[in-house]
Amino acid sequence: MAVSKREILDALKAVKEPELKQNIVDLGMVKAVEIAGPHARVTIALPTANLPMKDKLKNNVKETVKGIGGIEDVKVVVTPMTSEQRARILGQAPSEMEGMKGVKKVIAIASGKGGVGKTTVTVNLAIALSLQGHSVGILDADMHGPDIPIMLGIKERPVGSRGMLLPIEKYGLKIMSTGILAGQGDPIVWRGPLVNKAIKEFLGHVLWGNLDFLLVDLPPGTGDAPLTISTVVPLDGVLIVTTPQKVALADVRRSIGLFRGHDIPIIGIVENMSFLRLPGDPDGKVMDIFGSGGGEKIAKAFKLPLLGRIPLDPAIRSGGDTGRPVTLEANSEAVDVFKDIASRLVTYCSGPPAKGESS
């Protein structure tokens, strides 16, 4: 007689979440149970990507299901919970992540080193996604150097509604940044706890509405903001931005280590300022201002895809300075690269492998 889904769920009530000491079925952690003859696949939603004793929990699930007569093989898949699920399971106030409930995918844009053009990549990628028909928001999580408002030409300040902030809308994007809230040129002198609190407020108490993508522009390095994002938000992935030179690549390794240490999937590497195509050269020759091959080298070393090589283009700089990003303009080599990266991101987010999947 074939094993039923109900039998497996009943058996899994014996498995307890290691921190909360309650069974994973009643907590709503069992996301799916699939049965094919003697084979079973169980998907478990974790409250946090770096759940203590995650491996022990997976093993308990596997051994419990294998103990059911008629089941010979068990595959256990883990995936992060949504913000609402996590708020419920951890006993947080329902409004803790109220603003995020309509956000489908959260993608962080990170770099190990400053000055590699991470914010430039963020704004142009957001516009490229929007031009492809997706609803997109940007959270500027670089609290000490919030440049998103400058690059998008934003001068107005957000207004509140029922205890929530309404994001500024520009070029079809929804944007929130400390640079919008602070006065122009005013220093933002915040220590770690304030940075963490501000990021949580921006995530949960901004009315983002229904978004296909929320891009989070992280500060460089592996400090408070990246750590907060990686532990508070169920990230769907991270894009790592680098330039070709050796010093940038050394810092990229640390950034990759941070996110992999929290079991957050890295979507791929973007090499910015990759080369300069010599103007007027009939053969289209290029000059490698910052060296060459660095992005490809780091991608191969970590078995990650190189998503794109963005050329040095004066129009990119001009677009950032004037508040009208280059991706809004007519096609160019750089614009085509941004659009291709956007397409690859959409493909990644819409298909397998499943987020956090392991067996």
Image: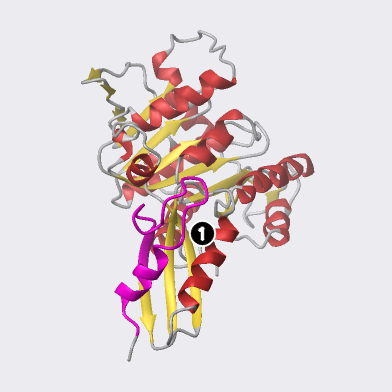
Residue 9 percent across, percent down from the top left: 35, 68
Colouring scheme, one of rainbow, by chain, secondary structure, one colour: secondary structure
Query: In the rendered structure, which segment of residues is drawn in magenta?
Result: 3-32
Residue 297 percent across, percent down from the top left: 73, 57
Q: Residues within 10 Å of mark 1 (few under 14, many from 20)?
A: some
Residue 143 percent across, percent down from the top left: 52, 22
Task: Say which element carries label 1.
Answer: loop
Q: Is residue 353 above or below residue 168?
A: below
Q: Residue furthest left?
A: 162
Q: Is residue 119 visible?
A: yes
- Left/right of residue 90 with respect to residue 288 in the rendered view: left
Q: Is residue 143 visible?
A: no
Residue 225 percent across, percent down from the top left: 56, 30
Magenta-span inclusion, residue 243 = no
- Left/right of residue 307 with respect to residue 346 in the rendered view: right
Q: Residue furthest right?
A: 246
| Residue at point 56%, 15% (across, down) | 190
Q: Main secondary structure of the magenta part?
A: loop
Q: Is residue 157 above or below residue 269?
A: above
- Left/right of residue 346 with respect to residue 54 in the rendered view: left
| Residue at point 64%, 31% (across, down) | 223
Check disc 1 and report the residue beneath it: 356
Magenta-span inclusion, residue 14 = yes
Amino acid under label 1? Answer: Gly
| Residue at point 50%, 9% (across, down) | 185
Name the residue nearer the viewer: 46 or 296.
Answer: 46
**Quadrant in which the N terminus appears:** bottom left
- Give the number of callouts: 1
**Quadrant in which the C terminus appears:** bottom right
Name the residue nearer the viewer: 218 or 80.
Answer: 80
Name the residue nearer the viewer: 256 or 335.
Answer: 256
Q: Is residue 275 above or below residue 154?
A: below
